[in-house]
Image (cartoon, grey):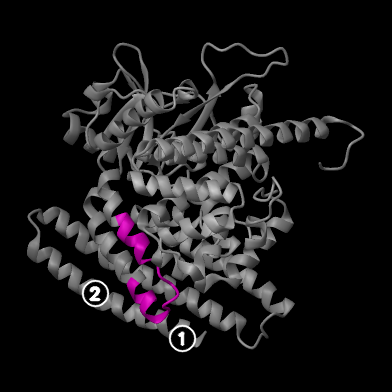
Amino acid sequence: MASLWRAGAKLSLVASAVGGGVTAALIATSDDPQTALKLCATVPNRLFRDAITAANIAFDYEYSLWGLPEGSSERERIKHEVHIRSAQKLQEMCFKNGGVYIKLGQHLGQLEYLVPEEYVRTMRESMLNKCPVSSYEQVCNVFKKELGDTPDKIFSEFDPVPIASASLAQVHVARTHDGQKVAVKVQHTHMTDTVAADHATVELIVNTLHKFFPSFDYRWLVDEIGESLPKELDFLIEAKNSERCLENFRKLSPHIASYIYAPRVYWNLSTSKLLTMEYMDGAYVNDVKAIQKLGINPHELSTLVSQTFAEMMFKHGFVHCDPHAANLLVRPLPFSKASILGRRKPQLILLDHGLYKELDFQTRTNYAALWKALVFADANAIKECSTKFGAGDDLYALFAGVLTMRPWNRVVDPSMDHLVIQGNESDRLELQMYASQYFHQISELLRRLPRVILLMMKTNDCLRAVNNSLIQGSSLETFLIIGKVSSEAVIEAKMLQSKSLLTWLNVKLEKTLLEVRLWGMQVVLWLLQLRKTLPWSDQAL
């Protein structure tokens, strides 16, 4: 623990030195003196704030846990308190710095398998929809630069108070001159000014921490942000992504296309820093009470969410990689009628299409084959597919565990519900113990895996959090859908690659056997559901 304090102190010194260097470089190379001056005032402050926060957290752990024996109840109690304090300090730093830092905080809130629960809970509760807000004056400045006039002139109505604010932008409600209600996404002005410097600052901190603590290796995350953030800051790319997403469902997944929606884009009122979209009424996907008031069954919605992203991952190869609760709305399927019991079919509305990842044919097929093996508890196939992604003979079991949040003995358990997470206290404690016990191996695994797979894992984490809010865990239906969609993708790939009549016949036979197996699983699922409804039954099949 002493090394942790020394690292914090050294990081403070490095930050001071680099802060001066960054300032000098900005002044020397800038074509925009006003922006350069702004950066010179903010970047060193952020670096200093980062270093002080890191040193403060390090000292808190060192001082508070000093002399407490490992494994003792007193040490665990104190550690829990330090985790909470440290998470709050980190949260405060992210909010003060904004932009890239909030993106990192949001990601931290999804890493249940790597960081203590206190950090996950603190970041998840604050980083998704409680981000800093730009002033109306700043919003007007963006409008003038992008569209040549102020919002009140461009729209017949414009609410100066945003309905939501995220790390990169905030959303205002407006009405066009022809009476259409729209949502206007306006980029925070500081993002354009400071994003490059913030990325360099974060990179410095992560590299410094990795130098002192080799197991702390988040360089892949910094690299990913460096590649994806410029795309996320161009709202025209986001608009094109949303249209391509819907087109994929219409062409490749027509059986559920009507259940998926993205807001229509008003191209004449959109630029790289302003995005005007159709205003959507709906409930957030984690608001169970509001969903039920709409007449929608949370279990049915959970199934739709799982199928939507399974189709994206295994069939489309074009994946929305930020499906946290603030980016998913639900409404009753338009033009559909309620059932006799008043139930309505759900329609999932996908928001924020800035972060997408493309999977090439080979990666998509291998990933589908891996999930097929996980659902059907095929240990040999899990090992084979995992090693293709770099997990190796030593970490393939851990890779399977991180993907499913289940220990290896459960992953290869032949029972139908072997991957189901109940979301209760026992499951939570098991996951925390698993993450703590294998922390160093998990860090090594993340270092080995391709970045695109790391993004798929982040997407899985987001979806797991959504499922947990809807049904307090995961369900057998979810994994049945994943097994079906991934298996279909593998069969389709083999059909495309078949070179001979014999190979084609073998694939056809495999497809028939798969359909029989899935049908059998569906029958068992129906029987399980029926048995749960019987008042005298308290036994599982």
Q: Is residue 358 visible?
A: no
Taking depth in this image into account, of 378 and 215 the one nearest to the observer is 378
Q: Are marks 1 and 2 in contact (CB under 8 Å)?
A: no
Identify the residue at image location x=20%, y=73%.
Answer: 20
Taking depth in this image into account, of 495 and 279 the one nearest to the observer is 495
Horizontal placement of 296 versus 239: left or right?
Answer: right
Quadrant that contains the C terminus: top right
Instruction: Measure the alpha-carbon separation of dots 1 and 2.
Output: 22 Å
Which type of secondary structure does the marked residue at label 2 adopt?
Answer: helix
- Res 3 label: 1
Quarter of the image for residue 77 reads: bottom right
Question: Residue 31's spot in the image, x, y percent?
Answer: 7, 55
Question: Residue 52's spot in the image, x, y percent?
Answer: 40, 73
Mark 1, other Cα within 10 Å: few <14 / some 14–19 / many ≥20? few
Q: Is residue 304 visible?
A: yes
Identify the residue at image location x=39%, y=75%.
Answer: 209
Question: Residue 147's spot in the image, x, y percent?
Answer: 18, 29
What residue span does the magenta drawing correspond to?
207-225
Q: Nearer the viewer, mark 1 or mark 2?
A: 1
Which sits earlier in the primary sequence, circle 1 or circle 2?
Answer: 1
Q: Is residue 220 magenta?
A: yes
Question: Residue 193's spot in the image, x, y percent?
Answer: 22, 52
The residue under label 2 is which amino acid type? Val
Q: Which residue is mark 2?
A: 18
Identify the residue at image location x=62%, y=28%.
Answer: 291
